[in-house]
Each structure stands twice: as structure tokens, then as C-alpha cells.
Image (cartoon, grey):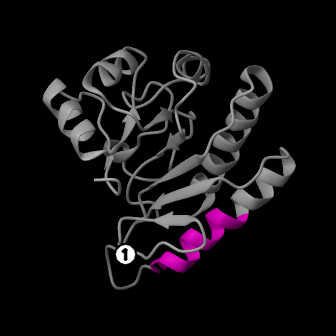
Amino acid sequence: GADLVVHGNNKADDELAAAAEAGALLVIDSLEEIERARAAGISRTLIRVTPGIEADTHEAVRTGHHGSKFGLSPDDALEAIRRAPETEGLHVHIGSQLRDQGAAQMAVDWVTALAARARNELGWKRETIDLGGGLGVAATPDERELTIAEFVGSLLAELDRALAEHSLDRPQVILEPGRSLTARAGVTLY
């Protein structure tokens, strides 16, 4: 159960209860979900944030743009942290079937800046940054496919750069490229 991450912008109460029973990490998608999660007995949470980044992918699988039904705006994310300062960290996901690192690196910069803002304004220290996922695969034999190592390596390099820029320590990092990898050196890869 501790390895489960429960997502979704419309979680039913029985799903919250099952997540609590399993000891899963719950990704909060709205301010009202904070109290529902507490009532269900959830003890581990991340706040999903919407960075306003348009990923270069099909519009049906974009999730980080302004107006997305997933996640909280920066101001609402700070309000969520005020209401639930025990939250473990931040989650960002800009879309699925990503074929280049550009937008994903922008999301890393954005979520790191938000973590610094939360530290500066609220004294909050996150333990985890979940960089979502969405690594794409080639649709035709001619298309170049990013390897997991390229995708993850570019995100971790950008994260280290952004953390240094904001004088933040490296947290636990969760990456969800859509393929199973092994956890090592404090970085959890899904």
C-alpha cells in the first residue's frame, strides 16, 4: 500500500477509504478534497498543481494547461498547504504521450519555484516532488523514441539546477514515466 499513489479529480468516498486502509499516498486535486481525505483517514498527501503549461501532445491528454480539470492553481495550492501543512509535497503532470523534454523541464522549473514560494510565504518544507509522467512512444517506425534514461535524466538534471537556483534541498522525487523502474538513491521511479 505504501507504494500506491492514488490520483483522480473525482474520487469517491469509498476510494478514499480504500486508499486510507492501504496507506497509499493520495494526490489532492481540489480544496474540498482536503477535508474529505481527512475524514476518510488519509495520512499521506501530495497537492496536485496546474502550471499552465501547454504540452506538445494531443489536446485530449494535456493536463497542465490553464483551465484543466486536474489540480490547483498556484494560489489555491498555497491555500491547500495552509489548510494541510502536513502534506508531503507537490505533484505536477502536464500530459501524456510526451515526445520531448521541453515542456516537462518547464514543469520542473515551475513546480520548484512554487515549492520555494511555499517555503518563503508559509515556512513549508516539502518532502516529495512528483513530476508526473507521460513519456510517449513512437507511433511509427520513423519516429525517434526518447529512452527512459534520456527523459528521466533530463528532468533530474533540470530539477537539480532549479533546486540550486532557489536554495532548496533535494527532496524525494517521484517520476512516473509509465514504465517500471527500480528505486535507488532516494529517487522513486514509477
Quadrant of the image occupied by residue 98: bottom left
Total labels: the figure holds 1
- Secondary structure mostly taken by the magenta-highlighted segment of the chain: helix
Is residue 10 shown above or below 31?
A: below
Is residue 56 shown above or below 87?
A: below
Residue at horizontal 45 percent and vertical 78 percent from the top:
145
Q: Amino acid at mark 1?
A: Ala
Quadrant of the frame with the C terminus? bottom left
Residue at horizontal 35 percent and vertical 73 percent from the top:
180
Q: Position of residue 97 (x, y in %)?
A: 38, 60
Is residue 148 shown above or below 13?
A: below
Q: Which residue is mark 1?
A: 138
On whether residue 128 falls in the magenta region, the answer is no
Q: Position of residue 73 (x, y in %)?
A: 54, 23
Asked whether, in this view, residue 34 is left or right of residue 77, the answer is: left
Asked whether, in this view, residue 53 is left or right of residue 37, the answer is: right
132 vs 97, nearest the viewer: 132
69 vs 87, nearest the viewer: 87
Q: Position of residue 105 (x, y in %)?
A: 64, 56
Residue at horizontal 35 percent and vertical 22 percent from the top:
38
Assess disc 1: are there few (<14), some (14-19) or many (≥20) residues with their C-alpha within 10 Å of its C-alpha: few
Magenta extent: 144-157
Residue at horizontal 24 percent and vertical 46 percent from the top:
22
